[in-house]
Amino acid sequence: MLMLDSSILQPFLNRLPPATQYAYHGIQEPKMVRFAAEYQDQPVTIYLKNLIHHEEALAWKSFDELLRYSVKMAQELVKGFYGLEMFYCHSQQNLSQFSPQDFSTLVLNHSRKLMTGGKCLIRYGVFAGCLTKRVEEDWGKIDFLTSVEVIHKEREQFDLVLKAAASKIPERDRSVWILLNNISDKPLWIENHPEQEARMRKTYKAQISLRQNITEAMILDPTQVVHLNTLYGQ
């Protein structure tokens, strides 16, 4: 678990209801990022999916390769076995400002401060992740894990992404938020689109009926946040 300072996780957190005490709990399959928080003095579990539409998958592939190149640069200088998990990424519009050298230096500097089992936040531009020191060694290795899923469905079938995410929610979690974070430049939610709206309404209602611990579901598009429980009710 990694406690998160909300002041350095903007613009992500300012798009959510005002929860507190955010803690990162890791990436679960299928590429679902798990957080814990408190909302109105009650515990809430947050499952985040970072999504990109297949039309823009090439842009994500380029960024992924850039990240892996940067991590490899850091790996050549670290000592010890580390894990680096990317748990959040927002719109890729500022990627031209991404410097592999600066990013690798940031990872390297943080790695030198960690004791075995220690964790820290890595925040650089559009990237937010958790660095963990697993084992003390004379050699260096960094396992790098991302959490972005390419959507191969058309936007009209976006409800299937919500359905797939909801099906993985454990019953033990009492109050759950599902966040569908779109890192594409184009929105996944189409305004005034009857087919998409009808499908999403039907799927949302069905999932809420099946899994009553889902108390919030949101689509985080580049220009807006869509609150499904506001649109369709609990």
Image (cartoon, rainbow, N blue to C red):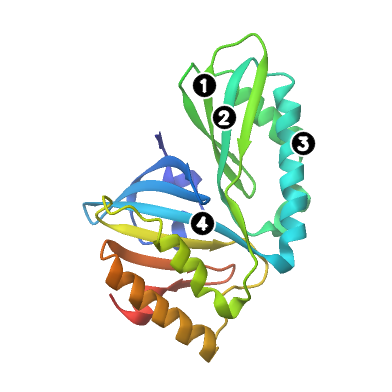
Vertical side of 230 occupied by 109: above or below:
above
Residue underneath mark 3: 69
Residue underneath mark 2: 83
Residue 139 at what x, y percent from top left?
A: 67, 12
Q: CA distance from mark 2 to mark 3?
A: 15 Å
Quarter the N terminus occupies: top left
Quarter the C terminus occupies: bottom left
Residue 157 at what x, y percent from top left?
A: 56, 77
Residue type of the residue flagged with mark 4: Lys
Asked if the residue under mark 3 is in contact with the one under mark 2, i.e. CB atoms within 8 Å, the reply is no
Q: CA distance from mark 4 to mark 1?
A: 25 Å
Q: Residue at x 40, y 82 (%)?
A: 202
Residue type of the residue flagged with mark 2: Gly
Asked if the residue under mark 4 is in contact with the one under mark 3, i.e. CB atoms within 8 Å, the reply is no
Q: Secondary structure at mark 1?
A: strand
Q: Secondary structure at mark 4?
A: strand
Q: Looking at the image, which is closer to me, 135 or 100?
A: 135
Q: Residues within 10 Å of mark 2 (few under 14, many from 20)?
A: some
Point out which mark residue 134 bears: 1
